[in-house]
Image (cartoon, grey):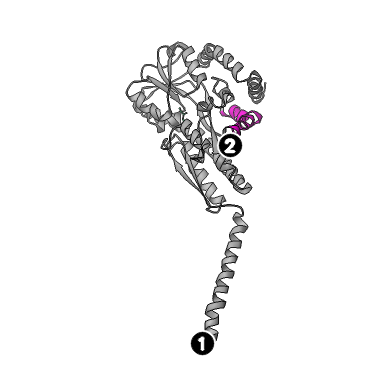
Amino acid sequence: MNNWLKRLAAGVILPGILLLSACGSAQNESATTDGIQERTIKAGIGNSKMHPQGQGMVKFKELLEEKSGGKMKVQNFFDATLGDDQKMTEALQGGLQEVTVPSTSPLVGMIKEFGIYDFPFVFNNEEEAYSVLDGAIGKKLLDKLPEHDLVGLGYWENGFRNLTNSKHPVVTADDFKGLKIRTMQNEVHLDAFSKLGANPSPMAFSEVFTALETGTVDGQENPLATIQTQKYNEVQDYLSLTKHVYTPFVFLVSKKFWDDLSEEEQKIMSEAAQEAGEYQRALNRKENEKALKYLKEEGMKINEVKPEEMAKMKEVIQPVTDKFAQKFGPDLVEEMMTEVEKVRGN
Ligand code: KDG
């Protein structure tokens, strides 16, 4: 090849080849991740990475990164490093954070109807809760989120809550009397524990361990996996399996962020939240069983609560439930109870 031809090859043909191959790879990419942009999602929760909720977030990250061909990246923050449930929810509303998965309970000040999930002793098992959460009622409440600058992609599981304390086993309704108990920031929980004769004190999740350690409160209530991962057993002797209420988590996305996503991005984000949620719920059920065994081995004094004693506790609390049913919407409560009865086959 003479010099002229060599120069032509280097100056025209080679860049041409490079350009063509660059187009080719751009086309390949757009064939798989069309309409997906590079994005970084800040996601925060109060629980630790080891908690089933933390593991659910790890799964969500994996799934979204895979579905977006690595373009949508998730940065997970655990242990309330971005703040507690309420603070992170406000950060989503302001567009400062993209995802959080709080308990529904602290959101009741914003959407009062979420309070129906806080009624004690409504669900007997997870299946009953799922039928309400994953059905028409759950959706109706998620549909209220956008008017608060939030989008809900479904419910994950916090689970059945049990009481721990440093004073004595809680076997009967009377045993609550005089106990200083930390509750979530939720009016149903506050009134229910007051009705049982306890002294409830609302507090953000990240403050609970210190409050138990310093004796500011005598006890708290949470699902078993949380009691284990937060190491409450180190500062609490008694664990009573009261299973007094089932708390859902709700997967929240900032609406400001959501509205900026393409349809395809919204679709894969919904799918990732849903699939990670199924994984999280299954893991949660398994880990709660393991946690019970662990807490026993660690020396907590654990007691079951007989069904007739639970029924008595429910009876004491009933005026609270009735009062809030009026506030949250009697028809909605009725609809929830009908759904539960249907699952029970009644
Ligand atoms: O990550 C979730 C926690 O922030 C919180 O919702 C846990 O149930 C909880 C509590 O007691 O505050």
Is 343 rendered above or below residue 262?
above
- Dot 2 corresponds to which residue? 151
Residue range highlighted in magenta? 126-147
Q: Residue furthest front?
A: 94
Q: Quadrant of residue 226?
A: top left
**Mark 2: few, some, or many residues within 10 Å (few <14, many ≥20)?**
many
Specify whether residue 239 is in view.
no
Disc 1 is placed on an element classified as: helix
Mark 1 residue's CB less than 8 Å from ligand 1: no
- Dot 1 corresponds to which residue? 3
Q: CA distance from mark 1 to mark 2?
A: 64 Å
**Residue 309 on image: x %, y %:** 50, 14
**Residue 182 on image: x %, y %:** 42, 21
Confirm whether the magenta stretch covers residue 139.
yes
Is 72 rendered above or below residue 335?
below
Q: Type of residue at label 2?
A: Val
Tell me the quadrant of the picture where the N terminus can be found.
bottom right
